[in-house]
Image (cartoon, rainbow, N blue to C red):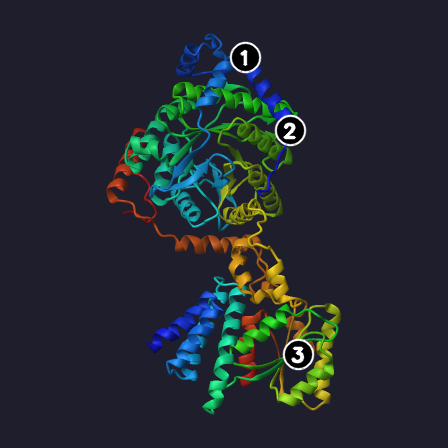
């Protein structure tokens, strides 16, 4: 039954079984279930449950990421199907994210990128040690409406401010909302440099991104 | 490999046992109990009835060591083995017989009442790190004469875990036994599957009082495990050199094992204690002194050499409030106890030496215990090869967080603390109210107690132990028992 396959997909995300997610997604497609239904009825509920369990302390980061990876792999199967039907996912936003120049820390940034992708955002992860110009160029190129800047060193935090300035100089500041993150970063710092938001953890980042994309 | 702490060389252990045996010969042990003196006389110890001293030859002690079991289990009220005394099993129970409770609201000491101990029992049930209950405090709303049995009565109503307890009188021991037998389904069932251990304490140096000796003998004859709690005070009631204090502990404990086995060979007995190194400025008995911890770990090693189950009072603090001293002393003692392989570690929740219990400290101690248990699990290979396959798969990518290997192993590799332990960012901590460990612990006490659900307990059984307790209370002038705080069946 189709609802059975969809609940199996949900369970596979909650149980952290990405192989099962992929297998059952294929089965669901073969059974004629529409890609959008698979996403809305199987994948999204799974990711939401995982996020809730994380927020209440039952689940931990590995649960989150393994689920997000499962979602990502399933989406790779579903995207061609959507295109073939001339359907698109209503994406909450397009994000350009990276760790600023001079900084090679990536765990938190990759976590946020994965979670955003798992929640339907179009994510352009520029990696680490990203030059300011690259942020600006990619924003222009993909028409992003969100920028995520990560910095884990007090010495590179200031580059976040420089990226914002560069976006202003390029006339792109009005097009995007800028989120900042990283261990030494704080709400106070975000306000000080004129960023639009700061999130505590990856789940918070998704909520913040949704809020900012709407405003 | 299991991380372990070794304090004494084998040579030292042997010398300790040798000197302890010598002490039992000369000056011998004072025994103020008729029954014990008779048992010892029958075994051909030299008895000085006038002074109440028994000089015990080594052969008798060695025989006792042969029949004393090297392990036994305690069972929960569902009949399942829940605690293993023996080998290097490490389990924890709260400190027992506190005279005061640290009030949750005021953080000041006061006399505990029924509601406090009931709340405490529920809290212990909700803390998975704590393996057994104890009759942790003496309730002030009942006559002192039934102080021991009343707390057992309360505990039996709300607990599922086994309980470490003790009697304050000879007659109340029997009342407590009656209650335990009722709950276990009869004396035979209780002997087969014990649900309680009784602490019995010699007095330093080298004295068995009438009361505690009688308790020991009654436990042995009824196959109820007796936990010897010898408490040399180095520099005051025992020599100040730690090695000598351990010898006194060994002598007292060997005499206890002997008396117990003479009463009934094969009865379960525990090599336990609550020693301290006397504080030379304040004249107090510091539980947080590292010398105290050394005595505990050293005598535990001696007990293991004698193939006996072990116990120690560790994990307490001399602080009067739940502050930094409280934390550091509790953590130090708890970690060492785990590394020393003490089978039952008593002390969680206890501060102000051994006189006060605290709900909040209990919750914090539970976290230390969780860490200690994780510590002694050490580091395992987990997979073969340990790292090569996985690390070659990832190459130079730092993507371990999303690996199914991480998901599979993280909860086994890590001790995952509750929110009592703050590991958030500074911002997160501020957003949550900039709370101290004490404040977070206080919230956790409330939330755990709120989630407690009383295990099934037949109304007949409930009525039976209430009747037993009521009869005992009546003997000492109390007509009606205090209510069981709204959980009356």
Q: Position of residue B35 (x, y in %)?
A: 39, 16
Measured Cα–Cα span from mark 2 to mark 1: 25 Å
Measured Cα–Cα span from mark 2 to mark 3: 60 Å
Q: Position of residue B480 (x, y in %)?
A: 29, 38
Q: Position of residue B389 (x, y in %)?
A: 60, 61
- Tag 2 subunit: B
Measured Cα–Cα span from mark 1 to mark 3: 81 Å
Q: Position of residue B48 (x, y in %)?
A: 48, 8
Left or right for B114, reference B315: left
Q: Which residue is mark 3?
A: A126
The reply to whether residue B235 is in sight is no
Mark on residue B470? none
Q: Which residue is mark 1?
A: B25
Identify the secondary structure beneath mark 3: loop
Closer-to-camera residue (B27/B439) = B27
Which is closer to the viewer, label 2 or label 1? 2
Q: Which residue is mark 2?
A: B9
Q: Quadrant of residue B143?
A: top left
Location of residue B74 with respect to A143 vertically, above or below: above
Contact flag, marks 1 and 3 (Cβ < 8 Å): no
Location of residue B101 with respect to B42 vertically, above or below: below
């Amino acid at each position: 039954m189709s609802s059975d396959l969809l609940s199996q997909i949900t369970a596979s995300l909650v149980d952290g079984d990405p192989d099962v997610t992929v297998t059952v997604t294929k089965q669901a497609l073969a059974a004629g279930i529409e890609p959008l239904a698979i996403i809305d009825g199987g994948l999204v509920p799974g990711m939401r449950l995982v996020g809730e369990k994380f927020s209440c302390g039952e689940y931990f980061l590995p649960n989150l990421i393994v689920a997000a990876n499962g979602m990502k792999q399933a989406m790779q199967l579903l995207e061609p199907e959507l295109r073939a039907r001339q359907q698109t996912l209503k994406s909450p936003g397009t994000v350009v994210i990276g760790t600023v120049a001079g900084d090679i820390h990536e765990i938190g940034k990759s976590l946020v990128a994965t979670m955003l992708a798992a929640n339907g955002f179009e994510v352009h992860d520029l990696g680490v040690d990203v030059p300011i110009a690259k942020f600006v160029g990619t924003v222009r190129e993909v028409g992003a409406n969100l920028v995520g800047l990560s910095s884990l060193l007090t010495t590179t935090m200031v580059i976040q401010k420089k990226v914002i300035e560069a976006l202003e100089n390029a006339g792109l500041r009005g097009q995007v909302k800028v989120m900042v993150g990283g261990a030494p970063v704080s709400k106070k710092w975000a306000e000080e440099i004129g960023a639009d938001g700061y999130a505590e953890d990856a789940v918070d980042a998704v909520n913040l991104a949704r809020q900012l994309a709407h405003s | 490999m299991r991380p372990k702490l070794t304090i004494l060389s084998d040579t030292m252990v042997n010398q300790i046992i040798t000197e302890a045996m010598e002490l039992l010969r000369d000056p011998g042990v004072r025994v103020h109990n008729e029954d014990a003196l008779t048992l010892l006389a029958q075994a051909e110890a030299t008895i000085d009835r006038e002074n109440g001293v028994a000089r015990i030859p080594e052969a008798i002690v060695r025989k006792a060591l042969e029949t004393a079991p090297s392990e036994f289990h305690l069972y929960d009220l569902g009949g399942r083995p829940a605690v293993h005394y023996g080998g290097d099993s490490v389990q924890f129970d709260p400190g027992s017989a506190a005279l005061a409770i640290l009030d949750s609201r005021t953080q000041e000491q006061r006399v505990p009442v029924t509601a406090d101990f009931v709340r405490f029992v529920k809290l212990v049930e909700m803390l998975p790190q704590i393996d057994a209950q104890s009759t942790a405090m003496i309730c002030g709303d009942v006559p002192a004469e039934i102080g021991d049995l009343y707390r057992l009565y309360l505990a039996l109503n709300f607990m599922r875990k086994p309980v470490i307890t003790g009697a304050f009188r000879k007659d109340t021991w029997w009342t407590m036994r009656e209650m335990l037998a009722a709950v276990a389904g009869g004396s035979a069932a209780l002997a087969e599957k014990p649900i309680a251990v009784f602490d019995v304490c010699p007095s330093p140096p080298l004295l068995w009082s009438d009361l505690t000796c009688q308790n020991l003998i009654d436990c042995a004859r009824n196959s109820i495990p007796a936990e010897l709690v010898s408490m040399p005070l180095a520099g005051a009631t025992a020599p100040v050199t730690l090695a000598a204090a351990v010898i006194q502990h060994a002598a007292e404990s060997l005499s206890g094992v002997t008396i117990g086995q003479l009463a009934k060979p094969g009865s379960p007995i525990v090599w336990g204690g609550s020693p301290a190194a006397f504080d030379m400025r304040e004249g107090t008995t510091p539980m947080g002194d590292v010398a105290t911890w050394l005595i505990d770990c050293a005598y535990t090693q001696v007990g293991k050499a004698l193939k006996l189950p072990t116990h120690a009072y560790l994990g307490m603090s001399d602080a009067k409030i739940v502050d930094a001293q409280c934390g550091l002393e509790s953590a130090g003692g708890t970690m060492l106890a785990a590394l020393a392989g003490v089978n039952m570690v008593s002390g969680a929740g206890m501060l102000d030496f051994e006189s006060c219990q605290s709900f909040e400290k209990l919750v914090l101690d539970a976290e230390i215990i969780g860490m200690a248990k994780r510590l002694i699990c050490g580091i395992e290979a987990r997979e073969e090869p340990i790292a090569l396959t996985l690390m070659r798969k990832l190459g130079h990518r730092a993507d371990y967080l999303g690996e199914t290997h991480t998901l599979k192993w993280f909860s086994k590799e890590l001790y995952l603390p509750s929110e009592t332990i703050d590991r958030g960012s500074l911002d997160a901590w501020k957003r949550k109210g900039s709370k101290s460990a004490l404040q977070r612990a206080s919230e956790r006490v409330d939330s755990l107690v709120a989630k407690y659900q009383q295990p099934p307990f037949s109304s007949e059984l409930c009525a039976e132990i209430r009747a037993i307790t009521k009869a005992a209370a009546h003997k000492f002038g109390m007509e009606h028992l205090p209510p069981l705080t709204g959980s009356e069946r």
